Image: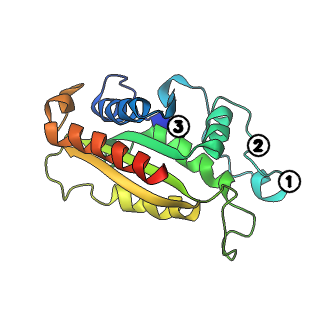
């Protein structure tokens, strides 16, 4: 069982990283393999709109650090995307990654009943943290990306969200959020087994 975890925060000890760490620790304890990428430590560009992935290649044409990440996800059973909410959106590091996933779509993705180049049956855990305590604020972030990852064949998409956490690692004091991350890992691993 392979899990790829993407940390989208520039703070490696931040709240989204803490929740991802909790999730991944449970996965490891249950016998899963985890590969983690800190997006802020990689050198990559966003999608260039070159359309090479729709005309001449079956993967992104850019040769940078994100190439390894995109390839690892092809072989993964579970993808964890952990991001803080910055200005009502995922971090710029995470957004750059998401834009490059356009390469997962087949050239005729708009009309193809199976639009993705990825094998089906993958699981996605979307971890979102925010300083704003009001859960209604920025509740639109997850559904927007859930829509696109369903195109890629992720058939089980779960949200782990913590609101009202700002200081680095502050979420560790939130038993509800840490327990949700751990329980989500346990349930996904049981579903896959």
Q: Percent position (x, y) of residue 131?
A: 20, 40
Q: Using residue 89 as the reference point, say whether residue 129 is left or right of it.
A: left
Q: Nearer the viewer, residue 100 or 128?
A: 128
Crowding near pointer 1: few (<14 within 10 Å), some, many (20+)? few
Residue 119 is drawn in which quadrant? Answer: bottom right
Can you tell which mark lies on residue 56? 1
For marks 2 and 3 on the same chain, the one whose residue lies earlier in the sequence: 3
Q: Nearer the viewer, residue 191 or 17?
A: 191
In the rendered view, tell whether residue 102 sits above or below residue 74: below
Q: Percent position (x, y) of residue 69?
A: 61, 35
Q: Residue at x 66, y 32 (%)?
A: 68
Q: Percent position (x, y) of residue 110?
A: 66, 73
Can you tell which mark lies on residue 61? 2
Q: Nearer the viewer, residue 185 or 109?
A: 185
Query: Could you give the CA–CA distance between mark 2 and mark 1, rounded to whole angstroms?
Result: 9 Å
- Of helix, strand and loop, which one carries label 2? loop
In the rendered view, tell whether residue 110 sits above or below residue 171: below
Marks 2,1: beta carbons within 8 A: yes
What residue is shown with label 3? 4
Q: Residue at x 63, y 54 (%)?
A: 102
Query: Could you give the CA–CA distance between mark 3 and mark 1, rounded to whole angstroms?
Result: 27 Å
Q: Residue at x 48, y 48 (%)?
A: 193
Marks 3,1: beta carbons within 8 A: no
- Of helix, strand and loop, which one carries label 3? strand
Q: Is residue 193 visible?
A: yes
- Nearest to viewer (mark 3 / mark 1): 3
- Of helix, strand and loop, which one carries label 1? loop
Q: Nearer the viewer, residue 24 or 164?
A: 24
Looking at this view, name the residue that lies furthest to the front: 193
Q: Quadrant of the N terminus?
A: top right
Crowding near pointer 3: few (<14 within 10 Å), some, many (20+)? many
């Amino acid at each position: 069982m392979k899990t790829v975890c993407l940390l989208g925060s520039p703070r490696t000890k931040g709240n989204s990283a803490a929740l991802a760490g909790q999730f991944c620790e449970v996965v490891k304890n249950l016998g899963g393999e985890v590969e983690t990428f800190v997006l802020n430590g990689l050198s990559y560009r966003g999608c260039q709109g070159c359309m090479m992935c729709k005309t001449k290649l079956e993967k992104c044409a850019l040769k940078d650090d994100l190439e390894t990440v995109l390839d690892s996800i092809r072989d993964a059973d579970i993808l964890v995307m952990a991001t803080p909410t910055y200005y009502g959106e995922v971090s710029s590091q995470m957004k750059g990654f998401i834009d490059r996933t356009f390469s997962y779509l087949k050239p005729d993705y708009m009309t193809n009943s199976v639009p993705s180049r990825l094998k089906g049956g993958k699981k996605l855990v979307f971890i979102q943290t925010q300083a704003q305590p009001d859960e209604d604020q920025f509740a639109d972030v997850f559904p927007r990306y859930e829509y696109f990852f369903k195109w890629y064949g992720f058939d089980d998409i779960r949200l782990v969200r913590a609101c009202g956490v700002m200081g680095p690692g502050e979420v560790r004091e939130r038993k509800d959020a840490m327990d949700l991350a751990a329980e989500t890992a346990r349930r996904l691993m049981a579903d896959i087994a």
